[in-house]
């Protein structure tokens, strides 16, 4: 199952499906995934229609943020879907690659994480133009996963297959310390974009440790 608002991306995926003979076993949705219905999108980055790059950006990125805002266009509600609307079963592997919109995707999967088992989750933590101290934007994602017992790995620093105990702290104080260290690696005062790849493992994930 795949979700992508870009028709050109789905065309490549359709080709892959045909080459691998997946047939009807694979479902595709030409939609944005979000917990909100009012979304703006520019083909690369999506945000709530109420989000302002300019207001949320670090001061030195203000001009670039205003330019980015101008590229955004409102999306029809029919082009937006939540994971809870579609996925009502256990999931072996979930990949969330949405250039900073990950928190909204996770919010759209509240029932999925609550009622079903998502064994493995690969996702990004993306900083783009806005400041890290933006009201706990990614804190909520990490806290929610930790609440459900997930072990969360910074796979830029640790190989989970080789070090299955190398996950980040799952209690509030330790997680906050880890986030503060992350901000040092990605200083918004000097750069406008960086990305950290994360990997989360369900406490009852099959075939774990690998």
Image (tube, rainbow, N blue to C red):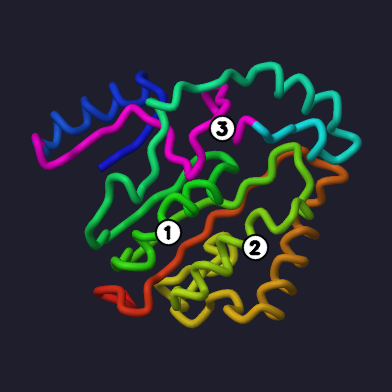
Residue denoted by label 2: 139
Q: Earlier in the sequence, mark 2 or mark 3?
A: 3
Residue 25 on the magenta span: yes
Which residue corresponds to the image point at 31% horizontal and 78% vertical from the top-left?
Answer: 204
What range is drawn magenta here? 23-49
Label 1 to label 2: alpha-carbon separation: 16 Å
Contact? badges 3 and 1 (CB < 8 Å): no
Residue denoted by label 3: 46
The quadrant of the image that shows the N terminus is: top left
At mark 2, the secondary structure is helix
Specify few, some or many for label 1: CA neighbours under 10 Å numbering under 14, 14-19, or 20 or more: some
Q: Is 80 located above or below residue 182 in the figure? A: above
- Looking at this view, is 208 or 110 the one in front? 110
Q: Residue furthest right?
A: 59
Count of labels in the image: 3
Label 3 to label 1: alpha-carbon separation: 20 Å
């Amino acid at each position: 199952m795949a979700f992508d608002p870009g028709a050109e991306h789905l065309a490549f995926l359709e080709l892959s499906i045909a080459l691998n003979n997946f047939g009807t076993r694979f479902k595709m949705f030409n939609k944005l995934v979000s917990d909100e219905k009012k979304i703006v999108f520019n083909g690369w980055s999506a945000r709530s229609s109420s989000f302002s790059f300019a207001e949320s950006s670090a001061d030195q990125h203000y001009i670039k943020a205003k330019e980015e805002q101008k590229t955004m266009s409102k999306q029809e509600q029919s082009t937006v879907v939540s994971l809870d609307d579609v996925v009502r079963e256990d999931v072996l592997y979930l990949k969330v690659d949405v250039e900073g919109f990950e928190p909204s995707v996770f919010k759209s999967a509240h029932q999925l994480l609550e009622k079903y088992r998502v064994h493995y989750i690969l996702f990004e933590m993306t900083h783009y133009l806005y400041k890290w101290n933006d009201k706990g934007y990614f804190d909520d994602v990490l806290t929610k996963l930790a609440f459900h017992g997930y072990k969360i790995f910074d796979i830029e620093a640790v190989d989970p297959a080789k070090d299955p105990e190398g996950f980040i702290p799952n209690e509030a104080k330790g997680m906050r310390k880890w986030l503060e260290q992350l901000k040092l690696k990605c200083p918004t005062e000097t750069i406008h974009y960086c990305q950290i790849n994360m990997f989360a493992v369900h406490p009852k994930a099959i075939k774990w440790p690998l």
